[in-house]
Image (spheres, helix red, strand yellow):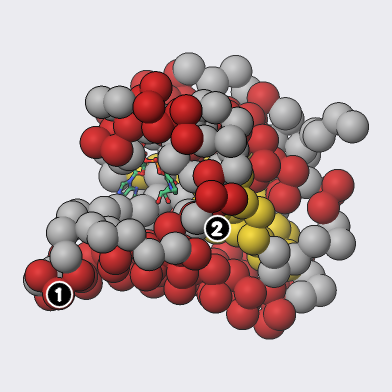
Amino acid sequence: MDIRFDGKVALVTGASRGIGLAVATTLAESGASVMLSSRKAEALEAATAGIAGETAWHVANAGEPDQAAACVEATLERFGRLDILVNNAATNPYAGPTVGIDVARFDKTVAVNWRGPLVWSQEAWRQWMADHGGSIVNVSSIGGLTVEPTIGIYNGTKAALIHLTRQLAMELAPGVRVNAVLPGLVKTDMARALWERGEEKIAARVPMRRLGEPADIAAATAFLCSDHATWITGTTLVVDGGMLLGS
Ligand SMILES: NC(=O)c1ccc[n+]([C@@H]2O[C@H](COP(=O)([O-])OP(=O)(O)OC[C@H]3O[C@@H](n4cnc5c(N)ncnc54)[C@H](OP(=O)(O)O)[C@@H]3O)[C@@H](O)[C@H]2O)c1
């Protein structure tokens, strides 16, 4: 089964590194024209330079609705259509007991991780997908299905994102499919504190005996975006090497 995106246009948030960069790379190298977005121009410039395929970049904070609207507009101006939106950007500014979180960091987490995917989906729908169809993939987390001691609000936004995925899937069908991928522990900057020290020990407890790589998540995301998944909507695809099985 060959997954191709020739003639398709994708927009990926949080695309300058980690999972977002892997998704953008996979889609571009499979034929899509890809708009990469995140907050820092320099990082985006470097990211696009490393991808073989048609790409462009646009600076936008995923938690700022005006910037979401402008980025979708820029994608349409640059590439003339928008078939795929990957809501990947997220933040985790607080680690500690949930009762200790302050309002500013609570609001930031919710604005980027939960309101963000809604607003970007609204803009994609309003500016293109309502008339032409499309596919949206939200990058949630297995944390959205579990309870952990120090990242309760981050996980809460990921649980809310699973619900939003199902809700939008019902509302936007049949023109637009909406699905979620739920990564386990993946070796990126965001999760560095969780895996850098003691990777081997953690891997030994994972049924597949290794941590995730960004490419693992990119492959699942590409499948959900593709024409091989046209009867799949509202689903959550866990990609975790079996981590959840022991929970
Ligand atoms: N790594 C894991 O173990 C893991 C597990 C489960 C789920 N996830 C999810 O996977 C997704 C990607 O995470 P990652 O691990 O790849 O993280 P990462 O390597 O830290 O990359 C995060 C990306 O998002 C961008 N970003 C951060 N805040 C942003 C904002 N407010 N607006 C726009 N862009 C923003 C960053 O670029 P700038 O800083 O330049 O903006 C960067 O491109 C997230 O949704 C995360 O929750 C990760």
Q: Is residue 171 visible?
A: yes
**Mark 2 is on which residue type?**
Asn
Q: Is residue 167 left or right of residue 190?
A: right
Please tell me whether mark 1 sits on a helix, a strand or a loop. helix
**What residue sits 54% from the left and 68% below the top?**
162
Question: Residue 107 sits in which quadrant?
Answer: bottom left
Quarter of the picture holding the N terminus: top right
Question: Residue 6 sits in which quadrant?
Answer: top right
Q: Are marks 2 and 1 in contact (CB under 8 Å)?
A: no
Residue occupied by mark 2: 138
Residue lying farthest to the right in this orientation: 1
Q: Nearer the viewer, mark 2 or mark 1?
A: 1
**Mark 1 is on which residue type?**
Val
Quick one: 106 or 12, which is closer to the camera? 106
| Residue 8 x, y percent position in the rendering | 73, 43
93 in relation to 14, above or below = below
Distance from the alpha carbon under mark 2 to that under mark 1? 27 Å
Q: Is residue 97 left or right of residue 78?
A: left
Residue occupied by mark 1: 99
Q: Is mark 2 within 8 Å of ligand 1?
A: no
Quick one: 166 or 44, which is closer to the camera? 166
Q: Is residue 67 left or right of residue 167?
A: left
Quick one: 57 or 74, which is closer to the camera? 57
